[in-house]
Image: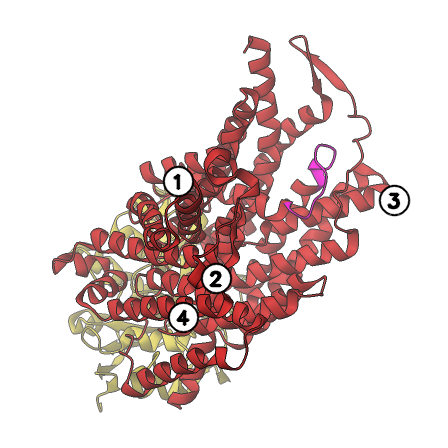
Chain colours: A yellow, B red
Amino acid sequence: MLEVSGLNAGYGRAQVLFDIALEARRGEVVALLGRNGAGKSTTLKAIMGLVPPLSGEVRFEGTRIDGREPHEIARLGLGYVPEDRRIFTDLTVAENLAVGRQPARADAPQWSTEHLLALFPALSRMLDRSGGRMSGGEQQMLCIARTLAGNPKAILLDEPSEGLAPLVVEQMAGVILELKRAGVTVLLAEQSARFTGRVADRGYTLEKGELLPA
Amino acid sequence: MSGSAVLLQFLNGLSGASALFLVAAGLSLIFGVTRIVNFAHGSLYMLGMYLAVWLSARIGFWASVPLAAALVAAGGAAVEMLLLRRIYKAPELFQLLATFAVVLLVKDLALWAWGPEDTLGPRAPGFAGAVEIAGRAFPQYDLLLIGLGPLVFLLLYLLLTKTRWGILVRAATQDREMVGALGVNQKLLFTAVFMLGAGLAGLGGALVIPREPASLEIDLAVVSDAFVVVVVGGLGSIPGAFLAALLIGEIKAFCIGLGYSKITLAVEFIVMAVVLVLRPWGLLGRPQAAMRGPAALEAPLDPPSGRAVAALLALFAGLAAIPAFTTGYTLVLLTDVLVFALFAASLHFMMGPGGMASFGHAAYFGLGAYGAGVLLLRLAAPMELALALAPLFALAGALVFGWFCVRLSGVYLAMLTLAFAQIAWSIAFQWDAVTGGSNGLIGVWPAAWLASKTAFYYAALLVCAAALALLWRLVFSPFGYALRASRDSALRAEAIGIPVRAVQWAAFCVAGLFAGLAGALFAFSKGSISPETLSVPRSVEGLVMVLLGGVQTLTGPVWGAALFTWLEDSVSRGFEYWRAAIGGVILLLVLAFPRGVAGFVRERIAR
């Protein structure tokens, strides 16, 4: 589904990622573990085209996507849930979902608005609330729902449990398992091995921009 | 003023506000999504006026209005696709420079197509008469305009809140990168927004032709009005722009109605200054979130190496030797280069190390020039004393204006500097007794021993070289370090005990003082001072010089000033379309050297 090989990336003169190679097969939940600053977010951003890779290859369903624009990559069916959520705070919940909406595709699970609201019942009570007036947990749910509205085949999830109350973390784990059941491939960046242990099929560990041998 | 007169002025204000709103709404939309401050927005308005006048003679007024708006929208799309698309990742001020080049190009395009004379449009058929309101005649067409403003506002509001496209525009205003990661093609969105904004400006221009003649001077006048409206209302806020257009339109109408036409020129800028100080993000705007996307981290400036100092000394020696070879026009030109190098370097001091962009640096240049003139002519001070004391006038101005300006940052700060420059300009333009009003001051000649071109050239060379050395020394002084720390992270600088605002205020004053010195030299080199000395185009020239040279290089402003002064001089002599030529050159430079000329050379050497 998603294959990365020999990926180098960074910001300006500072190289952050060194020769990353990883793979997520169809329907898998794959964890990318590492502490703060290890390069997890940068890996996801480089796959998404938000940080242009210096070298290396990224393939999505066999198609080279490195060097493509983020919107092209998203339209191929790869969703991205950023670490800091990046909710459009001036827009309502319903409008946030509308921004993420893309046409349904035949070979991926479809997420109608009703479907999304069933997955995140909390959101259905606040469709007209502006994104800026939500709690962190609610924003995290909206952020995932917004990406799912694009009916992706695979998603990159950046630290979905970060800074959330234990109860909400519980919910997040449930959501990820739900995504797996629906057949969405997930690449999950996390600091918490306890969390990934519960939801992931297998994992990679990043340290200082390099993958540790498995 | 009787009740009916008040009512009429009120209506006048409303009709003026409508056209103002159309332009400002477009400017605000474009800024919100693309983060580009479109200096050319007034030019699009002007183009709308000319096109409507030209078209209405052929196809009638009512058909010409939508067609002119559509043509301007198409022109806007072309500018976005051919130019702006290439520079979205360039620094903010470079984009500004590029849009200023478009201003120059459009101005000469209009000059070429429609000539230098003001052109009157036709009356609007069906709305040519007047209606009686409270016993006084009021033009029917103005009533129509009063209705059109709110109508367009309503349509825009519906577009932005009820359509998917509008929702995308609002989302992109906040975080365009995230919108892209969700699968939205930003390029198309940006082009469409620019087209809409340009179309609104064109529509605004086309609609005013029954009231005002199309003229080549309208572009900068309108864009500064629109800036004020957008900043007062809050950048990116359409309701804010509407409210601010009403406010400014009314205030202007009442100033004229009450006979205070003299302060009309400054009053909107005073309103803006007051609003920005009380509510720095505008009436309905929100505090600007930090920009998304990879932050432009500036590499620290290296102190000049021994080789660089030697090269500068050699340059100084070379310049000192020039009078041995020529005494003619070259010396006059070189004197100009020296003066503008100092002016640009002073602006660079606050923009580069200080991180505070100014759109109104000419104010301090002009204060220095007028200071010199007033001391010499009105107070009969000797020339040497006038030259020494004149920069203090600029310093005084910088002390007052800077106190307000350092409370803001980014585009808002730049707008406030523009506002103060405009105030200074309108005082110089109208205070006949002291500044000579629109005629300016004449007979500001240097003392006898400096009267020859060669002597004055040497004086300018010594003063400018000393001032430049001092400015550069300051950058690497503890004060310079504190200033750069404040630029790079105001919060961290505060936390280690740097009084950020005080440091920035001091830098603002230093920049003002040195600009004043350049202004005083300029006055004595020309022998006269006109209000253009502190006008907006002069401020923009300073920006162009700094950006041409490269903001994050130390000597860049000097090269930028030399290049620009030489270009302007060689192009403006005997060529009618010199503005377009300069605009074209600026565009080429912006596209070819997004880090400035000195930055480009440095990169080449580093390789």
Q: In this view, does B26 lie to the left or right of B521?
A: right
| First along the sequence among labels 4 and 2 | 2
Q: Distance between the residues labelled 4 and 3?
A: 58 Å
* Chain of the residue on which disc 4 is drawn: B
Rendered image: mark on residue B451: 2
Q: Mark 4 belongs to which amino acid?
A: Leu
Q: Distance between the residues labelled 1 and 2?
A: 50 Å
Answer whether residue A65 is visible to the viewer in this image: no
Q: Distance between the residues labelled 3 and 2?
A: 58 Å
Q: In this view, does B224 lie to the left or right of B109?
A: left
Residue B139 part of the magenta-drawn span:
no
Please state which of residues A100 and A151 is positioned toward the viewer in this rendering.
A100
Residue wearing tag 1: B282
Q: Distance between the residues labelled 4 and 2?
A: 15 Å
Please tell me how crowded label 1 is: few (under 14), some (14-19), or many (20+) other residues with Cα within 10 Å. many
Same chain for the residues at labels 3 and 2, yes or no? yes
Please state which of residues A123 and B393 is positioned toward the viewer in this rendering.
B393
Residue B213 part of the magenta-drawn span:
yes
Same chain for the residues at labels 4 and 3, yes or no? yes
Look at discs 4 and 2 and give the one toward the viewer: 2
